[in-house]
Every structure is written in C-alpha cells, then in structure tokens.
Amino acid sequence: MVNIFFKTYGCQANVADSTFLISYLSNRGRVVSCENEADFIIINSCAIREKAEQKLFSYLGKLALLKEDKPYLRVGVIGCVASYRKRDIFEKFDHVNFVFGAKEDINVLRSYLANALEELETIKKIYYNDPINFPIKFRRDRDIEKIVVERCGGCDFECHSFLQLGQKKLNKLEETGRKKLKRAFVNIMTGCNNYCSYCIVPFTRGREVSYKMKQILEHVKGEVKGGVKEITLVGQNVNSYSDPDSGAKFIALLREVAKIEGNFWVRYISSHPKDMTKNLFEVMAENKDRFCRHLHLPLQSGSDKILKAMNRVYSVEHYLKIVDWIREVLPDATITSDIIVGFPGETEEDYQMTRKIIEKVRFDLIYSFVYSKRKYTTAFNYPDDCKQEEKLSRLYALQERAKEISAENNSKHIGSVQRVLVEDRLKNGRLWGRTSGNVLVHFDGRDEKTGTFVDLKIGKADRVKLEGVLVEKEI
Ligand code: SF4
C-alpha cells in the first residue's frame, strides 16, 4: 500500500481542497502523518504572503534528502503557488514530479492522483523486491517521467496516466480506517472577482466560480451522515455565492443547509463587507441551533483613504453599519477580523484610524499582518515610503491592544454555560474544543467526549482561551 502525506499551507479553501482529496485518496492508499513514512507527498501551497511562499520553497528543498533514501518517492505541489510558479518549481526542484495550480479542475487532479497511486504501488514493489538493483530509470524521477508519463503536449501537466508499465489492475486496497473527522470544510465556490489591490488570489485561483447548490447540499449531507459535527462553508467571498443552475444566492443556500437533518452546526468563511446584508444575519438568527454565533468580517483598514487604495469598495461607515446589524440581530455573536498594517501610503493618521475602529468594534480576535508585496497585484507598484521597522512597531502595538480586548471579551463569558464541540486531547491531558463563537475552551473530561457537543460552565478566561467544567447532561 502507498503511504500518502499531505502538507497544507494557507487558508480554509486549501484545507477544504486537501480534505476533499484526502477523503478520496484514503481508499486508495494510507494517509500518514509524517513525511518520513510517505511514498507520495502532496503539498498544497499558499501564495497570500511572500513568507508562505518562502516556506514552501524551503520545505521542497528538504524533501530532496528524503528522495535520496527513497528513490521512488513522488512529490507534487498543488494550490496557489502552483498556479503561477509552475515553471520555477520544476526548474529549481528536480525531485518534484507534478505541479497543479488552484485554477485547474480539482476533478482532473483527483483522477490523475488515483492513477499515479496505482502505478506507484507497482514501482514501490519493484524497489522492495530488489533495492540494490532497482533500475536506475526508477531512481531518478525525471527518468521515471520519461518512461511512464504520456504528456498531452498542450501544457506541462501530466494529465495522462502511466500507461507503459501495463499495470492497470485496480487493486481493492484495504480501508485505511481514516480518523473520524468532526469538522469538515466544504468549498462552495472558488476564485474571486474583487481584485483587492494587495491580493494575489484572483491571479492564483482565477475568476469566481460558484459550485452547484445541489452538489454542495449532497456534500454537506454526506459529511453529516459520516458523523461530522461542524461544517464550514468556504469560499474567497462566500456572500457573493450564486448557484449556477438557479441563480439562488448565499442566503438561499444557508436556508437549504439549515433544513438538513442532524446534530451539527455550520460556519462560513470568508465574507466581503460589500456583500453583507442584514437579511443574512436574520436567517442565522432564525436558525440559531444551526448557525454558529461567529462572524469573520475582514476590515483590513480603518481609513477610507487606504480602503480605497486597497480597492475594498466599502467605507468605514458602511462597515460599522454592518457591525450594528450584527449586534442588533445576533447580540451574542463574536466578531473577528483581518487587518493589514503598513499598506503603501498608510500614514500614522491612517493607522490611528484603524486603532480607533478596533476600540469601537472591540473584535474578539484579529488576524493582523504587515502588508506583503505580491507580484502581479496592483499595489505592487505603489510607492511606499514607510520603513519596515515603523510598520512592525505599528503592528506590534496594534496586536498588543487587540489581545487585551480579546481578554476583556473572553472574561465576559465567566459564569456562563457554553456549548462546545470537543476537538481533541492536549499534551497536558486536558480536552479542548470551540464554542459556537469559535472561542477556544480547555476542560477536563473523558476521551469519549471527543467529537461530541458538551456544555461547559466557564470559570476562567484569558486572551486566548476559556476554561470550563462539564455540566453533565446528554446532548
Ligand atoms: S476579496 Fe479581496 S482579499 Fe479576498 S480573495 Fe478576493 S481579492 Fe483577495
């Protein structure tokens, strides 16, 4: 049996793609948790910041050593970096077998991987039967490609199966006993039409494409039937969803998801403030046992001037109106956000405007970063006279204050009873899970609680988590 290892960088869209592939491939091989055990390594790459791309390249460099010990090892890169640096990856890393971008059809990738796994099983057997005399043609990956890969000639992608080995038998591999998942990410769309001036996603994932509602609902039903307790609907801009069959919008999708029977709750990410309507929160409020009390609403900046330069097409005033709707319709919901500090042209005054909004909204959690220049984006050529040290000092000051606010917000939960989906056991022996508001909670309990909903009475809180005790009753 072939051991498959997935390394996933980046956002929930990547996690959803990896989960989809893992679920499909787990019947064809054994999914392992360490590179050293793997025969086939698939890396799902992220291009959102330069740092993520550097991490990928450094990781790929390390994998060359593994290939020396295991000459049949196959390595592939998928996802966003694969979309626009295919040639660079092939040129720099001889040991990479295939590169498949996020814009390409994941179903094509799926069937490619199924064929590749089948062939790799044969190659692996040849190696272990006689490692000393393992044919040199199998030792070097490029040679393997020459022998076994048919290229269509239209692109660099190895979209044809490995026919020449003549081993097309479909062995029914034993079930891997895949670890039962409690959470599932379901992609409802891919790509983005917004072209925020700092963002590379429209270039790596392409234009917005919504998936069919019928298929999404089937996917959700399947996950729930399989025991999943939390579904996250994922897309670059979920609230611009539009069913390609009927034109039904995101709210209609939520209404349909709400009708699915089962004991599970639903999140969605990411939303664009320009597409937010009060009605969306009303649908969530009407189905309060189904939709989590958590909104992730990226602000990016508290300055209208910077928002305009970012091409975010909403004003601070509009953003605050949405926050008011949330507070009115879903008063117990947590609100989290993304902030970019040091965007080109950001003055101290602009930065202080962002700080002001943070004080006003009092976000439960902020994901904040210094602006990272990305090739191909509009902002790449923007003049930027703010020094990196200044940007970092702004970032650290903002993060410190944001953490204090998180701690203050978390402390408000003390004394309340929170429903929590239990994830796993920590190294310190305690269990952990998340509330409907996506706040982390630690508590003591038995293993059987993992993957179930429990009610916890909250006794302590700090900036990152709550601590609670079980309120014993069956849910
Ligand atoms: S909405 Fe903007 S930030 Fe989000 S994926 Fe699209 S272009 Fe990027």
Image: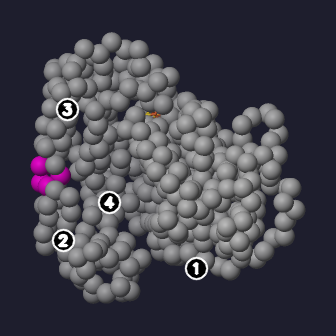
Query: Considering only order in the chain, which callout, 2 or 3, is on the residue closer to the N terminus?
Result: 3
Residue 473, which numbered label?
none
Q: Tag 4's secondary structure?
A: loop
Query: Considering only order in the chain, which callout, 4 or 3, is on the residue closer to the N terminus?
Result: 3
Looking at the image, which residue is at 18% across and 42% down?
399
Query: Considering only order in the chain, which callout, 1 or 4, is on the residue closer to the N terminus?
Result: 1
Q: Which residue is mark 2?
A: 467
Q: Nearer the viewer, residue 408 or 213?
A: 408
Question: What amino acid is found at the position of numbered circle 1 in the picture?
Answer: Gly
Q: Is residue 154 above or below residue 313?
A: below
Q: What is the distance, in whole Å, between disc 3 and disc 4 at their CAs?
A: 28 Å
Could you say where residue 279 lies in the image, as x and y percent from the top left?
Answer: 44, 45
Residue labelled 4 has its Cβ within 8 Å of some atom of ligand 1? no
Nearer to us: label 4 or label 1: 1
Range covered by the magenta-colored residues: 404-408
Q: Nearer the viewer, residue 403 or 278?
A: 403
Can the viewer see residue 316? Answer: no
Q: Which residue is mark 1?
A: 177
Q: Is residue 455 magenta?
A: no
Secondary structure mostly seen in the magenta stretch? helix
Could you say where residue 7 lies in the image, as x and y percent from the top left?
Answer: 49, 56
Residue labelled 3 has its Cβ within 8 Å of some atom of ligand 1? no
Q: Which residue is mark 3?
A: 392
Looking at the image, which residue is at 52% across and 58% down?
66
Looking at the image, which residue is at 32% across and 66% down?
434
Quarter of the image that includes the C terminus: bottom left
Q: Which residue is mark 4?
A: 438
